């Protein structure tokens, strides 16, 4: 092994050298601190995405929408409230409910996702997820989880679930065991009230409860990289009688569009985001 040995010097020379180096370092550091502000990736404001409205469809005003999935030309919808919760198969263009399963009145249904040939519907405070056959809506089982259930989606490998906090949970889709978490941040700060979820081309989309925005989350680090603001979808007449908050996101990969609606909304909107490099392309 080769040792690097410094040339001999006096104790005084050594102290002077240290002081000189330290002074230069402090001077440089102070100059950098004064002239170059520290900007971290986490603190970068999300990009606001623009969109076009492709279609406007009717929606049942009695549907307290909690979860929305698009598959094979139909919308699958979970509606909430005790005594009113249901699972529905809906024709997007007419809003016609062609298939329906009533949920036991003791459960307040929440988010919905598909997994292979099943639908998974979670409940708010019962700690229970209900599973159904995709075609027949016949109940196929259930599984439990801790805490509240708000929204659920899947990325092709695992289930992703929200509980109203800034933490998303990952579940094994076969065993339903929790396998990890993701802390979601907006400009470096935790973003709570994450509700209905949808996985779109490598990103997690989430309704933020009591807001008119959908946020785009990078699953690599939980950072909100973009948001879609939808404050003016409904007209004044649409809002009378009263409607509740924006909730419900379903992705149509064929047309690269999103279906969005809300609780007790009279309409479902199909929108397409304008060109953005914030999503991974899948071919």
Image (spheres, helix red, strand yellow):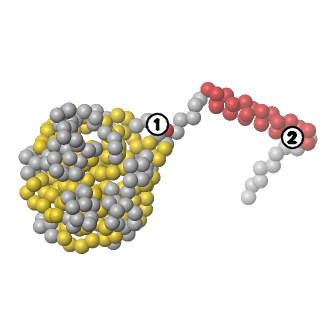
- Give neighbour class at mark 1: few <14, some 14-19, many 20+ (Cα, 10 Å): some
Tell me the quarter of the image containing the N terminus: bottom right
Determine the secondary structure under disc 1. Answer: loop
Residue at 37% x, 61% y: name it: 148
Q: Nearer the viewer, mark 1 or mark 2?
A: 1
Residue at 25% x, 60% y: name it: 82
Observer-nearest of 35 and 127: 127
Res. 236 visible in picture:
yes
Specify which label sits upstream in the sequence, 1 or 2.
2
Image quarter of residue 266: top left
Observer-nearest of 110 and 89: 110
Residue that badge 1 annotates: 44
Observer-nearest of 120 and 59: 59
- Disc 1, disc 2: CB below 8 Å? no
What's the distance in space between the residues labelled 1 and 2, CA to CA?
Answer: 44 Å
Residue at 16% x, 42% y: name it: 267
Q: Which mark is residue 63?
A: none
Res. 176 visible in picture:
no
Determine the secondary structure under disc 2. Answer: helix
Residue that badge 2 annotates: 14
Q: Measured from the top left, where is residue 211 in percent x and y? A: 34, 41
Residue at 24% x, 73% y: name it: 141
Image position of 173 (left or right of 83): right
Image position of 188 (left or right of 28): left
Q: Residue furthest front?
A: 241
Q: Measured from the top left, where is residue 221 in percent x and y? A: 44, 50
Number of marks present in the image shown: 2
Observer-nearest of 137 and 101: 101
- Give neighbour class at mark 2: few <14, some 14-19, many 20+ (Cα, 10 Å): few
């Amino acid at each position: 092994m080769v040792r690097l040995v410094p040339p001999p010097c006096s104790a005084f020379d050594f102290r002077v050298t240290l002081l000189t180096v330290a002074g230069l370092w402090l001077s440089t550091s102070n100059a950098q601190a004064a002239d170059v502000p520290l900007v971290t990736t986490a603190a970068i404001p999300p990009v606001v995405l623009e969109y076009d409205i492709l279609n406007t469809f009717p929606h049942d005003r009695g549907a307290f929408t909690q979860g929305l999935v698009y598959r094979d030309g139909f919308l699958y919808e979970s509606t909430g409230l005790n005594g009113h919760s249901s699972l529905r198969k809906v024709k997007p263009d007419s809003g016609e409910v062609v298939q329906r399963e009533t949920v036991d009145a003791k459960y307040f249904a929440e988010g919905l996702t598909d997994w292979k040939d099943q639908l998974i519907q979670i409940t708010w405070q019962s700690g229970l997820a209900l599973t159904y056959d995709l075609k027949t809506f016949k109940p196929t089982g259930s599984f439990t989880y801790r805490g509240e259930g708000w929204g659920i989606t899947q990325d092709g490998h695992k289930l992703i679930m929200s509980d109203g906090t800034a933490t998303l949970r990952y579940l094994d889709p076969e065993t339903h065991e929790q396998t990890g978490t993701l802390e979601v941040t907006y400009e470096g700060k935790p973003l709570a009230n994450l509700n209905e979820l949808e996985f779109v081309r490598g990103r997690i989309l989430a309704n933020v409860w009591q807001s008119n925005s959908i946020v785009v989350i990078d699953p690599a680090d939980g950072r909100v990289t973009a948001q879609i603001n939808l404050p003016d979808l409904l007209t004044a007449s649409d809002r009378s009688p009263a409607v509740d908050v924006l909730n419900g996101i379903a992705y149509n990969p064929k047309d690269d569009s999103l279906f969005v609606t809300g609780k007790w909304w009279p309409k479902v909107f199909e929108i397409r985001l304008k060109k953005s490099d914030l999503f991974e392309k899948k071919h």
